């Protein structure tokens, strides 16, 4: 038995194994044999293909940290997607009330449709159609307009019903309506310069939910959301919060008895790297709708559903 300290024996033996991996040096203490066999088995780890994949992944992540999204014209990071059977009438409603401009429409052989409309500086997607038989996806949306009183009256003339009369509060003049398709609209005009970047966009999705604090954590973990504003109630509920996603924001808060109803929402989310963000959302607890796939309309996208039933279609332009 060698009288060298065990650590010196191990160091010398590992050096010899790297030169001749088929022989365990005879001079080592018997207690080191198992360790040396393990060292021999691991001598080629990581393999070159693993190193190449790791380098590629690290380079991709480094690129993602500085890459910006080349949006399609008119689009921002977050775009609400409303799905209703009466899609034609829905498009007519937003044109009449908000002066929306239809920029794209496509139909399927089955009779369903997809349309894109511009409202101010933002976009909205509308899908469905008379032949559509799937679940509807109404939404709660805050729309900034030049004159909220006039837009509010146009909404009532177009068949919506008032859920909150026009009032001045929180630096805005606003009122709320529900259209006949189930969507909730917060129609607002700012009374002065806005204090939150991104919150002054023409269209902002509002996502009321149970356990809004956990939902905010999900937005941070899944999509890198940044909390811009949060007002908590004494009973550990979130009264109102604004979370930045890219160049856009979403607003959220806990449902209250007198609040608008919970409307699981569909959103289209542009990101620099759809594959990385899709994986991140899955790790944050979302369930896959479909993995990232190159689409014929020019985006690579993947879909997930969060624990509150909201659907997120994550996309990167090709």
Image: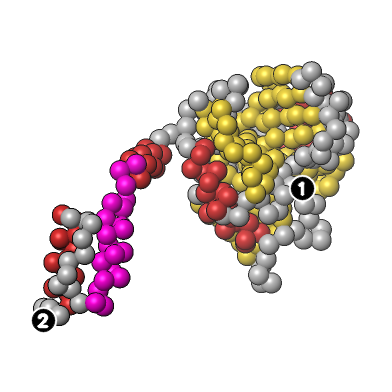
> Where is residue 8 shown, x and y percent of the image?
13, 73
Residue closest to the eye, 289 or 93: 289
Front disc: 1 or 2? 2
CA distance separating discs 1 and 2? 75 Å
Q: Give the range drawn in magenta.
A: 30-49
Residue beneath disc 1: 263
Does residue 170 sit above or below 32 in this rendering? above
Task: Evaluate whether residue 169 shows in this view.
Answer: no
Q: Residue at x 67, y 47 (%)?
A: 305
Label disc, if present, on residue 3 of the rendered structure: 2
| Residue 17 numbered tag | none
* The stretch drawn in magenta includes residue 170: no
Instruction: Label the magenta part by its dominant secondary structure.
Output: helix
10 Å neighbourhood of mark 1: few (<14), some, or many (≥20)?
A: many
Camera-nearest residue between 193 and 33: 33
Residue found 59% across the figure and 38% down from its top: 291
Identify the residue shown where x is 82% and y is 21%: 111
**What color scheme is it?**
secondary structure
Q: Residue at x 72, y 49 (%)?
A: 309
For disc 2, the neighbor class at 10 Å (few under 14, some 14 to 19, many from 20) is few
Query: On the image, which quarter does residue 315 sit in?
Result: top right
């Amino acid at each position: 038995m060698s009288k060298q300290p065990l650590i010196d024996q191990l160091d010398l033996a590992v050096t010899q194994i790297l030169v001749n991996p088929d022989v365990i040096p005879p001079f080592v203490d018997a207690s080191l044999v198992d360790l040396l066999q393990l060292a021999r088995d691991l001598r080629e780890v990581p393999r070159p293909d693993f190193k190449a994949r790791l380098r590629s992944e690290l380079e991709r992540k480094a690129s993602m940290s500085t890459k910006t999204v080349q949006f399609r014209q008119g689009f921002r990071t977050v775009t609400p997607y409303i799905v209703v059977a009466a899609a034609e009438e829905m498009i007519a409603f937003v044109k009449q009330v908000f002066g929306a401009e239809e920029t794209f429409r496509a139909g399927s052989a089955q009779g369903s449709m997809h349309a894109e409309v511009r409202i101010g500086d933002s976009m909205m997607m509308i899908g469905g159609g008379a032949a559509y038989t799937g679940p509807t996806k109404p939404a709660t949306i805050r729309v900034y307009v030049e004159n909220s009183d006039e837009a509010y009256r146009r909404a009532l003339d177009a068949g919506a019903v008032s859920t909150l009369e026009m009032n001045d509060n929180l630096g805005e003049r606003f009122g709320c309506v529900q259209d006949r398709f189930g969507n909730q609209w917060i129609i607002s005009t700012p009374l002065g310069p806005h204090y939150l970047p991104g919150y002054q966009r023409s269209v902002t999705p509002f996502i009321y939910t149970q356990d809004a604090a956990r939902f905010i954590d999900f937005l941070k973990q899944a999509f890198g959301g940044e909390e811009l504003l949060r007002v908590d109630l004494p009973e550990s509920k979130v009264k109102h919060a604004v979370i930045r996603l890219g160049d856009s924001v979403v607003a959220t808060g806990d449902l209250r008895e007198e609040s608008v109803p919970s409307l699981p929402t569909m959103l289209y989310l542009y990101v620099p790297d759809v594959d990385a963000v899709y994986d991140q959302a899955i790790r944050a607890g979302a369930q896959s709708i479909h993995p990232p796939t190159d689409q014929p309309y020019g985006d690579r996208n993947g879909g997930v559903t969060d624990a509150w039933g909201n659907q997120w279609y994550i996309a990167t332009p090709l």
